[in-house]
Image (cartoon, rainbow, N blue to C red):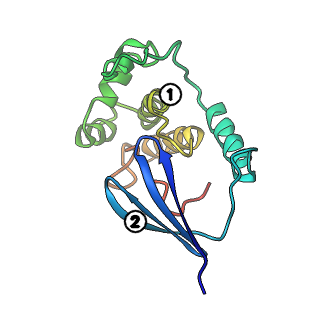
Amino acid sequence: MTESCTCLIRVEPFGELDVEHRSTFVQVTGRAGVGTLLLPQMTVSAERPTHWQGISAAKRAKRDSLLKWELDSLPSDDILDVTQVPATCGILDELELQITDSDAELILENIAKGVWLAEAVAVAFCKRAAIAQQLFNCLTEICFDDAIARGKELDEFFRESGGKTLGPLHGLPISIKDNFKIKG
Protein backbone atom coordinates (compact mmCIF):
# COMPACT_ATOMS: atom_id res chain seq x y z
CA MET A 1 0.00 0.00 0.00
CA THR A 2 1.33 3.44 -0.91
CA GLU A 3 1.25 6.22 1.63
CA SER A 4 0.43 9.63 0.28
CA CYS A 5 -0.17 13.16 1.45
CA THR A 6 -1.22 16.25 -0.41
CA CYS A 7 -0.20 19.80 0.41
CA LEU A 8 0.03 23.22 -1.15
CA ILE A 9 3.46 24.85 -1.48
CA ARG A 10 4.65 28.11 -2.98
CA VAL A 11 7.75 28.00 -5.18
CA GLU A 12 8.98 31.27 -6.64
CA PRO A 13 8.63 32.18 -9.49
CA PHE A 14 6.07 29.48 -10.23
CA GLY A 15 3.50 30.44 -7.59
CA GLU A 16 1.40 27.96 -5.70
CA LEU A 17 1.76 24.29 -6.56
CA ASP A 18 -0.28 21.33 -5.38
CA VAL A 19 2.05 18.55 -4.34
CA GLU A 20 1.07 14.94 -3.83
CA HIS A 21 3.85 12.97 -2.19
CA ARG A 22 3.97 9.21 -2.37
CA SER A 23 6.79 6.96 -1.30
CA THR A 24 8.81 7.26 -4.53
CA PHE A 25 7.40 10.20 -6.44
CA VAL A 26 5.97 13.68 -6.15
CA GLN A 27 3.24 14.77 -8.50
CA VAL A 28 3.23 18.53 -8.97
CA THR A 29 0.29 20.45 -10.39
CA GLY A 30 0.72 24.13 -11.20
CA ARG A 31 0.02 26.79 -13.79
CA ALA A 32 2.20 25.02 -16.36
CA GLY A 33 0.48 21.66 -15.96
CA VAL A 34 1.20 18.44 -14.12
CA GLY A 35 4.61 16.85 -13.66
CA THR A 36 6.03 13.91 -11.77
CA LEU A 37 9.40 13.87 -10.05
CA LEU A 38 11.03 10.66 -8.86
CA LEU A 39 12.36 11.06 -5.33
CA PRO A 40 13.59 8.93 -2.49
CA GLN A 41 11.50 9.11 0.66
CA MET A 42 12.49 12.13 2.68
CA THR A 43 11.19 14.60 5.18
CA VAL A 44 12.19 18.24 5.22
CA SER A 45 11.85 20.40 8.29
CA ALA A 46 11.28 24.11 7.82
CA GLU A 47 12.43 24.71 11.39
CA ARG A 48 16.16 24.06 10.89
CA PRO A 49 18.51 23.74 7.96
CA THR A 50 18.68 20.26 6.52
CA HIS A 51 21.74 18.40 5.34
CA TRP A 52 21.13 19.31 1.70
CA GLN A 53 20.89 23.00 2.55
CA GLY A 54 24.38 22.90 4.07
CA ILE A 55 25.74 21.08 1.04
CA SER A 56 24.04 23.58 -1.26
CA ALA A 57 25.43 26.58 0.65
CA ALA A 58 28.95 25.13 0.57
CA LYS A 59 28.67 24.44 -3.18
CA ARG A 60 27.48 28.00 -3.88
CA ALA A 61 30.30 29.44 -1.75
CA LYS A 62 32.91 27.35 -3.59
CA ARG A 63 31.44 28.30 -6.98
CA ASP A 64 31.34 31.98 -6.09
CA SER A 65 34.95 31.90 -4.86
CA LEU A 66 36.02 30.94 -8.40
CA LEU A 67 34.69 34.16 -9.93
CA LYS A 68 37.83 36.03 -10.96
CA TRP A 69 36.09 39.16 -12.18
CA GLU A 70 33.53 40.87 -9.96
CA LEU A 71 31.14 43.68 -10.72
CA ASP A 72 31.62 46.78 -8.56
CA SER A 73 27.88 46.80 -7.93
CA LEU A 74 24.75 45.12 -9.21
CA PRO A 75 22.04 47.07 -11.02
CA SER A 76 19.12 48.08 -8.83
CA ASP A 77 16.04 45.86 -8.84
CA ASP A 78 14.07 48.35 -10.95
CA ILE A 79 16.54 47.97 -13.85
CA LEU A 80 15.08 45.28 -16.11
CA ASP A 81 17.40 45.59 -19.12
CA VAL A 82 20.95 44.60 -18.19
CA THR A 83 22.18 43.99 -21.74
CA GLN A 84 24.56 46.96 -21.52
CA VAL A 85 26.26 45.83 -18.30
CA PRO A 86 29.07 43.90 -20.07
CA ALA A 87 29.95 46.99 -22.13
CA THR A 88 29.75 49.46 -19.24
CA CYS A 89 31.06 47.56 -16.19
CA GLY A 90 34.75 47.89 -17.08
CA ILE A 91 35.55 44.16 -16.88
CA LEU A 92 35.78 43.60 -20.64
CA ASP A 93 38.11 45.67 -22.84
CA GLU A 94 37.20 46.64 -26.43
CA LEU A 95 38.74 43.51 -27.99
CA GLU A 96 36.97 41.23 -25.49
CA LEU A 97 33.66 42.93 -26.24
CA GLN A 98 34.30 42.44 -29.97
CA ILE A 99 35.14 38.77 -29.40
CA THR A 100 32.11 38.03 -27.23
CA ASP A 101 29.78 39.90 -29.58
CA SER A 102 30.99 37.82 -32.55
CA ASP A 103 29.30 34.72 -33.93
CA ALA A 104 31.00 31.33 -33.86
CA GLU A 105 31.99 31.49 -37.53
CA LEU A 106 33.88 34.78 -37.10
CA ILE A 107 35.58 33.56 -33.92
CA LEU A 108 36.81 30.40 -35.65
CA GLU A 109 37.94 32.37 -38.70
CA ASN A 110 39.94 34.85 -36.60
CA ILE A 111 41.56 32.10 -34.54
CA ALA A 112 42.44 30.12 -37.69
CA LYS A 113 44.02 33.22 -39.26
CA GLY A 114 45.96 33.97 -36.09
CA VAL A 115 44.14 37.27 -35.57
CA TRP A 116 42.88 36.16 -32.14
CA LEU A 117 44.54 33.76 -29.73
CA ALA A 118 42.43 30.92 -28.34
CA GLU A 119 43.54 31.96 -24.86
CA ALA A 120 42.30 35.52 -25.42
CA VAL A 121 38.97 34.19 -26.66
CA ALA A 122 38.68 31.93 -23.61
CA VAL A 123 39.47 34.79 -21.21
CA ALA A 124 36.93 37.06 -22.92
CA PHE A 125 34.15 34.49 -22.63
CA CYS A 126 35.11 33.63 -19.05
CA LYS A 127 34.81 37.30 -18.15
CA ARG A 128 31.43 37.53 -19.89
CA ALA A 129 30.27 34.37 -18.07
CA ALA A 130 31.39 35.86 -14.74
CA ILE A 131 29.30 38.95 -15.45
CA ALA A 132 26.29 36.81 -16.40
CA GLN A 133 26.68 34.72 -13.24
CA GLN A 134 26.56 37.81 -11.05
CA LEU A 135 23.48 39.12 -12.84
CA PHE A 136 21.50 35.89 -13.27
CA ASN A 137 23.01 33.09 -11.14
CA CYS A 138 23.24 30.95 -14.29
CA LEU A 139 26.36 28.83 -13.70
CA THR A 140 26.50 25.61 -11.72
CA GLU A 141 30.16 24.85 -12.38
CA ILE A 142 32.90 27.38 -13.03
CA CYS A 143 35.75 26.01 -15.14
CA PHE A 144 37.53 29.25 -16.05
CA ASP A 145 41.02 27.95 -15.24
CA ASP A 146 40.46 24.83 -17.36
CA ALA A 147 39.17 26.89 -20.29
CA ILE A 148 42.10 29.31 -20.19
CA ALA A 149 44.61 26.46 -19.86
CA ARG A 150 43.05 24.74 -22.88
CA GLY A 151 43.27 27.99 -24.84
CA LYS A 152 46.99 28.17 -24.04
CA GLU A 153 47.44 24.55 -25.20
CA LEU A 154 45.65 25.29 -28.46
CA ASP A 155 47.75 28.41 -29.06
CA GLU A 156 50.91 26.36 -28.48
CA PHE A 157 49.72 23.74 -30.98
CA PHE A 158 48.89 26.50 -33.47
CA ARG A 159 52.41 28.00 -33.16
CA GLU A 160 54.24 24.66 -33.28
CA SER A 161 52.23 23.36 -36.25
CA GLY A 162 52.87 26.44 -38.36
CA GLY A 163 49.35 27.83 -38.13
CA LYS A 164 47.26 24.66 -38.24
CA THR A 165 44.19 24.29 -36.09
CA LEU A 166 43.35 21.23 -34.05
CA GLY A 167 40.01 20.43 -35.68
CA PRO A 168 37.17 22.59 -36.97
CA LEU A 169 36.17 24.01 -33.56
CA HIS A 170 39.72 24.92 -32.48
CA GLY A 171 39.45 27.54 -29.70
CA LEU A 172 35.68 27.97 -29.77
CA PRO A 173 34.38 28.24 -26.19
CA ILE A 174 31.36 26.14 -25.33
CA SER A 175 29.11 25.80 -22.33
CA ILE A 176 27.56 22.45 -21.47
CA LYS A 177 24.22 22.18 -19.74
CA ASP A 178 24.63 20.57 -16.33
CA ASN A 179 22.52 17.50 -17.04
CA PHE A 180 25.37 15.91 -18.97
CA LYS A 181 27.87 13.81 -17.03
CA ILE A 182 31.16 15.67 -17.26
CA LYS A 183 34.33 15.58 -15.23
CA GLY A 184 34.19 18.04 -12.36
Q: Secondary structure at mark 1?
A: helix
Near mark 2 (Cα within 10 A), the count class, few <14, some 14-19 or many ≥20, is few
Mark 1 residue type: Gln
Near mark 1 (Cα within 10 A), the count class, few <14, some 14-19 or many ≥20, is some
**Viewed as shown, does residue 108 lie left or right of 60?**
left
Q: In this picture, is 66 found above or below 143?
A: above
Nearest-to-viewer mark from 2 and 1: 2
Q: Which mark is residue 35?
A: 2
Residue designated by label 1: 134
**Viewed as shown, does residue 3 lie left or right of 78?**
right
**Viewed as shown, does residue 38 lie left or right of 175?**
right
Report if residue 175 is visible in the image: no
| Residue 71, percent from left and from top | 51, 17
Residue in the picture at 66% in, 46% down: 56
Going from N to C along the chain, the mark reached first, 2 or 1, is 2
Q: In this picture, is 1 found above or below 134?
A: below
Residue in the picture at 29% in, 35% down: 110
Q: Quadrant of the C terminus?
A: bottom right
Give 74 or 93, whichever is nearer the viewer: 74
| Residue 133, percent from left and from top | 49, 32
Give 81 or 152, whichever is nearer the viewer: 81
Q: Residue furthest bottom?
A: 1
**Rendered image quadrant of residue 65:** top right
Give the alpha-carbon distance from disc 2 to disc 1, as whole Å. 30 Å
Residue in the picture at 36% in, 31% down: 116
Q: Which mark is residue 72?
A: none
Q: Secondary structure at mark 2?
A: strand
**Rendered image quadrant of residue 99:** top left
**Rendered image quadrant of residue 40:** bottom right
Mark 2 residue type: Gly
| Residue 41, percent from left and from top | 66, 70
